[in-house]
Amino acid sequence: MTQKTILRALAGERLPVPPVWMMRQAGRYLPEYRATRAQAGDFLSLCYTPDLAAEVTLQPIRRYDFDAAILFADILLIPQALGLDLWFVTGEGPRLSTVTSAAEVAALKPVDAIHETLSPVYETVRILSRELPDRTTLIGFAGAPWTVATYMIAGRGTPDQGPAHAFKDADREAFSALIDRVTEATIAYLLAQVAAGAEVVKLFDSWAGSLRGRDFDDFALKPAQRIIAALKARHPHLPVIAFPREAGPRYAGFARATGADCVALDNSVSADWAAAEVQKDGCVQGNLDPRLLVQGGDALETETRRVVRAFSGGPHIFNLGHGITPDADPDNVSRMIAAIRG
Ligand code: CP3
């Protein structure tokens, strides 16, 4: 059997046509997602109902035959499993009870307790590994500790991660203890996803770009390095994708420093720069501006071909620079795929 295209690219192979999937490929731009979401009631019920979470994961595979499926869940399930309250306010986003002191970090549930909350997610992975086509790779994921901690500290999304920076700067020791606790929980969570059938894992560090200098080393690089080392100690051949979003120049060397097999690029870095400075260390993924899937037209095809061409000299997985947005046109996704697969 030929190995799956995504796994070949992650192993460092340059393919004549890059494999493709999209961040947030199961989501509100798809009418079938909106229907299943309505059936589940709210977003968290969808995450914790394995049959429905598996169904929405499969929807974009049926519609577009993407080369990978990403488990349907959310990065904020980990804080909930560590004991925080979590809810989503329609039209506004996530809300959590907060952690802002050493005592509150110490009061989080122990890492072993997370599986009680997260076991439905592992069941979703088991269903998917049975039901996905043989050619489709199943990607598990978690948020990276810094990004997850920014939500735990602020209790919501923030434009500049101000509360998390304030906690870090006021009490670096307590803040580091929080990062450590989330790091350990993330290792346990990802190992359980792999045991259930995830073939690749991805770490989402959506707010990595707001860390500077030594903070970037301590709270973006080191936790990723620790998580990847722990996963590979148990599963030496498990491919890992890291997404240090908006890391800019710090994208260079990120794969070497962390042991990641692939680095996911946002759309603020130049593809030509990344081909020279990031792809030299292995596979790259991403970079297409998700707004093009709203806009469509010639720009979508031109930019899609430009990204394919820029990364054609090495291992490449086609993807967006960030998640597809609810206002995207599903037909534009077909146009993008046609431009890639020709
Ligand atoms: O990519 C996928 O299709 C897999 C599933 C997935 C979701 N969220 C589903 C989701 C993944 C990998 C995530 C990651 C995630 N979640 C991140 C990191 C990646 C990124 O986008 O930067 C972050 C920061 C979150 C936290 C989160 N979840 C926010 C801020 C929101 C609200 C914003 C919004 O788009 O409404 C969510 C909700 C969420 N997670 C939705 C989906 C499909 C929309 C929920 C809905 O159906 O109403």
Image: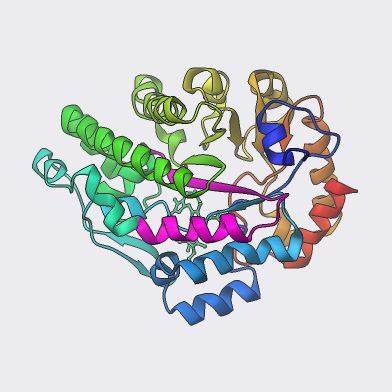
**Quadrant where the N terminus lies?**
top right
| 210 shown above or below 34 | above
| Residue 34 makes an appearance in the image | yes
Of residue 213 and residue 94, the one placed in the foreground of this image is 94
Give the residue displayed 16% in from the left and 42% down from the top: 105
Where is residue 261 shown, x and y percent of the image?
58, 27
Where is residue 118 shown, x and y percent of the image?
34, 56
Instruction: From the viewer's perspective, tell me whether residue 317 is left or right of residue 170.
Output: right
| 148 shown above or below 251 | below
| 74 shown above or below 153 | below
> Is 251 colored magenta in this rendering?
no
Give the residue displayed 78% in from the left and 66% down from the top: 331
Q: Which residues are magenta?
A: 119-144
Visual colour scheme: rainbow
> Is 137 colored magenta in this rendering?
yes
Give the residue displayed 35% in from the left and 29% down from the top: 219
Of residue 191 and residue 79, the one placed in the foreground of this image is 191
| Residue 72 makes an appearance in the image | no
Where is residue 325 shown, x and y percent of the image?
60, 60
